[in-house]
Image (tube, rainbow, N blue to C red):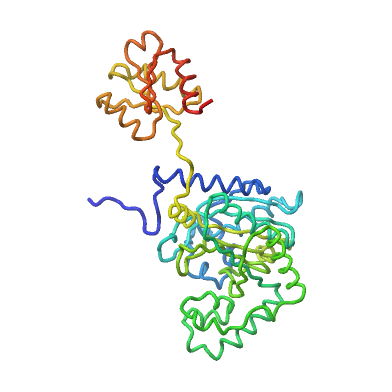
């Protein structure tokens, strides 16, 4: 019988890799928290209609990439392909915006999209998100961008490129849409099948197409379609980025892949990520999304950053948490000493020490060597004599220093050894 394998497009998080991911998640939580963003979480599946209305029926996400199903009650549900609609729904359903504006929230969790698996792109993947909901302010857009930038600074990542653009308001986009339709209509025979369909549904999406990239260079920019108000809004965003000493590049082709963006859009690119997958993440303003979901008009701004791609960059640049050797291995000298050794391990854990009981039947020297190999800083030996006397012998696996003392004294000595305090 063949062994069961993991589903295509998924990954296992193994212990050797978990420390790096936990460090990345904790760093993001700390940086976002320092800017006032509080933890939120939402269901891993939502009503399919929420994404059809919010993310956009004409987007690749909705048309091609959603994992949708019908439950036993006949309800159409979808594993979340992105986080913003669900977070906005949760915030507005709970009326959090009535108590304080903007509502600043952050979360990390898995998303699901059916797309061809490749480096940094999986069917199940994790994202880091923040959302600032309830105010329409250029300062909030700049703040959202700054949180993302400071996060990668805190990780120590270099080689970032910040791309920014504006899509203006609804009237601006309607004018720009008309300009794109006028440009692309005579070129329909040169477009791929998807873009021919998008031309009548969402022509801005044609600027994202990699197959028709050769036609994008001569396509009109959005600048002439922007109202003075939209130009002023975006100018203030970029002025604030300059004041924050965050370098950026204006990218008039940056439209993102979702229908709800308005005004500011941005992406963070990294030099080591090639081709269509060079973005670590991005986001922008989504005024208008609340109404599409059936709520009162409520502006918002946020981002989503890819955890897997961030981990890949950290590994490439040798970034990660400082090595920590905070565990102690507890070794019964003989099989009959296991109950006493287990009791000592429990006492050490009660004193705040990570204590791992090795009750295997290997020779003692091999168990000591295995403990050192797996990162233990010290070993505690418990034999019949120690058990009778209520003592234990601890050994520094680096220096070889060894002492016998009461379990309480051993715990104190180990705390000093592990923390230096």
Residue 281: x and y in percent read 54, 61
Q: Is residue 199 above or below residue 109?
A: below
Q: Is residue 332 above or below residue 193?
A: above
Residue 172: x and y in percent read 70, 77
Q: Is residue 304 left or right of residue 317?
A: right
Q: Quadrant of residue 299?
A: bottom right
- Residue in the image at 39% along x and 34% along y: 375
Q: Is residue 393 left or right of residue 419?
A: left
Q: Is residue 408 above or below residue 128?
A: above
Q: Is residue 74 above or below residue 418?
A: below
- Residue in the image at 71% along x and 69% along y: 234
- Residue in the image at 38% along x and 28% along y: 398
Q: Residue furthest bottom?
A: 186
Closest to the observer, 53 or 277: 277
Residue 1: x and y in percent read 22, 50
Q: Quadrant of residue 92?
A: bottom right
Q: Is residue 270 left or right of residue 38?
A: left
């Amino acid at each position: 019988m063949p062994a069961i394998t993991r589903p295509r497009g998924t990954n296992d998080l193994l212990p050797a890799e978990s420390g790096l991911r936990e460090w990345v998640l904790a760093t993001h939580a700390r940086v976002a928290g320092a800017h006032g963003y509080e933890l939120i979480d939402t269901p891993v599946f939502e009503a399919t209609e929420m994404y059809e209305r919010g993310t956009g029926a004409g987007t690749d996400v909705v048309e091609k990439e959603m994992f949708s199903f019908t439950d036993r009650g006949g309800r159409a549900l979808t594993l979340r392909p992105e986080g913003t609609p669900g977070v906005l729904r949760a915030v507005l359903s709970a009326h959090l915006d009535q108590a304080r504006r903007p509502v600043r929230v952050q979360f990390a969790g898995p998303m699901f999209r059916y797309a061809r698996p490749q480096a940094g792109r999986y069917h199940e993947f994790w994202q880091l998100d923040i959302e600032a909901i309830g105010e329409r302010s250029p300062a909030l857009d700049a703040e959202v961008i700054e949180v993302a930038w400071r996060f990668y600074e805190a990780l120590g990542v270099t080689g970032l490129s910040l791309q920014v653009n504006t899509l203006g308001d609804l009237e601006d986009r309607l004018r720009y849409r008309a300009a794109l339709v006028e440009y692309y209509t005579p070129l329909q025979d040169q477009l791929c099948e998807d873009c021919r369909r998008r031309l009548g549904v969402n022509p801005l999406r044609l600027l994202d197409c990699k197959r028709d990239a050769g036609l994008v260079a001569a396509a009109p920019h959005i600048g002439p379609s922007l109202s003075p108000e939209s130009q002023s809004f975006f100018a203030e965003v970029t002025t604030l980025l300059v004041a924050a000493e965050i370098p950026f590049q204006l990218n008039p082709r940056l439209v993102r892949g979702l229908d709800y963006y308005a005004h500011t859009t941005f992406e963070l690119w990294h030099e080591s990520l090639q081709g269509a997958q060079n973005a670590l993440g991005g986001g922008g303003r989504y005024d208008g999304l609340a109404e599409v979901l059936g709520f009162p008009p409520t502006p918002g701004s946020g981002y989503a950053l890819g955890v897997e791609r961030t981990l890949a960059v950290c590994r490439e640049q040798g970034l990660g948490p400082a090595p920590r050797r905070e565990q102690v291995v507890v070794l019964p000298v003989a099989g009959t000493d296991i109950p006493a050794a287990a009791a000592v391990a429990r006492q050490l854990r009660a004193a705040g020490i990570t204590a791992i009981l090795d009750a295997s039947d290997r020779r003692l020297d091999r168990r000591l060597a295995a403990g050192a190999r797996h990162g233990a800083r010290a070993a505690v030996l418990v034999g019949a004599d120690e058990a009778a006397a209520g003592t234990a012998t601890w050994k520094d696996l680096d220096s070889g220093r060894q002492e016998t003392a009461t379990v309480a004294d051993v715990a104190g000595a180990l705390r000093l050894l592990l923390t230096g305090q």
